[in-house]
Image (cartoon, rainbow, N blue to C red):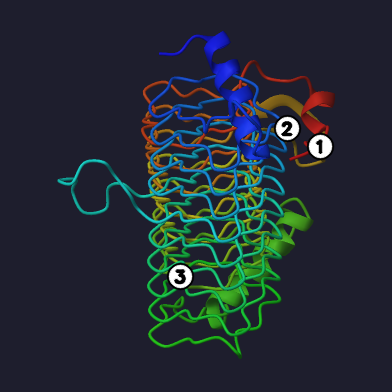
Amino acid sequence: MAELDEIKEIVKKHWLFVLGRPNGQRANLTSEELTNLDFGGLNLQSIIAPKANFTKSSFAATDLSFADLFGANFESADCTGANFHKADLRGARLHGAKLVKANLEGADLRPGSYNAYVRDGMGRTDLSGAVMTAAVFKNASLDRVFMVGSTCLRADFQGASMAEADLSDVDLSGANLSHAKLKGAVLTGADLSGANFKGTSLDGADLRGAFMESVDLTEADLRNVAFDTPKRAPRGDLLKKIARHKLWVDTQGAQGQRAMLANADLSNSDLAGTDLRAADLSGALLTGARMTGCKLSMCNLTHADLTRANLMNADMRGINLTGATMSRANLRKADLGTVKGRDSKGRATGKTWRADLSGADLSRANLTDASLIGAKLDGANLVQANLMRADLRGASIGRANLRGAIVLDALTGPMPDRKAALKPRTP
């Protein structure tokens, strides 16, 4: 491992090399341990650094164009405004890295590994949980890239090759995907609102559970695309029960009737915006249901099946989800915090109800920006769940399985006071 002074000398000589001056020498940092260092603003164009470990280092506004970064580790590195133009990033690890406004035009992010005997699926470039707002990936090679749970708000992927890429739960709102090649890509649970798909190839892509508000796919290649099963609007007896339940809620029990929907089959139902506060949905089948913006506070959903359900922006304060199945559910920006108890006259009882997700299956669920203040997560399965920027203050997570979960920028610690809890977070 090179000493810090030696690294400085190597970088200095590389600068002279880039300028074509005497005594210059192209830097070779192959397999070097270079964690927590500041390379910000330097010209490291064409540097040789395969398998180098740059974990938590800063590359803000650094020029890494044409660099050999094969298999390099940039985990949690700050690469804001960095230039990776036509860099070799095959097999690199950028989990949790900050790539806001970074330039990766023409970069190679295909799979790559030094081990010729790796198992199929290994060696993929890892951009999971990375923040890539307004980053540029024009004409980049992103085949089979692992990008689960990353933020690509307004990013430019024009003409990029993204065959078989895993873009599950990625925020691609406002992104430019025109003429990109997404054959066989996985976009389940992704936020595609306002994205540009003009001339995009989506042959064989999986868009189940994707949020597609204001998306125009008329000029995209949609052959063999897997879409959600069409949602069913409530009708008949269910519609009547929902209407009676809303009256029951609005009159605080004086009129109407509480919805008793235990074990009901509501799979693929369109319940967006429905008021089901304090309803009984225990054991209900809600697989693939659209429940965006639903009012579900104090609702009983014990042992319910919400696999792939879309609960984005839902009010779920004080909800009971004990033993529920929520694998791959979209809970982005959902509120699973506490709610204060009130009597029939609306007066505070002094009791606070916590959302209870004890023993729930939340594997690969998307909880980005969700509020879980004071929630009970004891024994919950959170394997590969996305908890980026989630608020977990005051939550109990004893015996919860967080293997492979993304917890980048999640808030932890004691329960905040009421004023702090009401203060909005800035992503």
Q: Residue furthest left?
A: 117
Of mark 2 and mark 3, the one earlier in the sequence is 2
Residue at the spot x=47%, y=51% of the render? Answer: 148
User: Residue 333: x percent and y percent?
Assistant: 66, 48
Q: Amino acid at mark 3?
A: Arg
User: Residue 203: x percent and y percent?
Assistant: 41, 82
Out of 91 and 236, give the one closest to the viewer. 91
Residue at the spot x=38%, y=46% of the render? Answer: 91
Of mark 2 and mark 1, the one earlier in the sequence is 2
Q: Is residue 144 visible?
A: yes
368 lies above or below 181: above
User: Residue 65: x percent and y percent?
Assistant: 60, 47
Q: Amino acid at mark 2?
A: Gly
Residue position marked by numbered label 1 in the rendering: 424
Distance from Cα at disc 2 to Cα at disc 3: 42 Å
Which quarter shows the C terminus? top right
Tell me if 184 is positioned left or right of 397 in this view.
left
Tell me if 356 is positioned left or right of 244 in this view.
left
Residue position marked by numbered label 3 in the rendering: 208
| Residues tagged 2 and 1 counted as in contact (Cβ below 8 A) | no
Q: Amino acid at mark 1?
A: Pro
Tell me if 178 is positioned left or right of 341 in this view.
left
Out of 49 and 253, give the one closest to the viewer. 49
Residue position marked by numbered label 2 in the rendering: 41
Q: Is residue 409 visible?
A: no
Mark 1 surroundings: few (<14), some (14-19) or many (≥20) residues within 10 A: few
Mark 3 surroundings: few (<14), some (14-19) or many (≥20) residues within 10 A: some
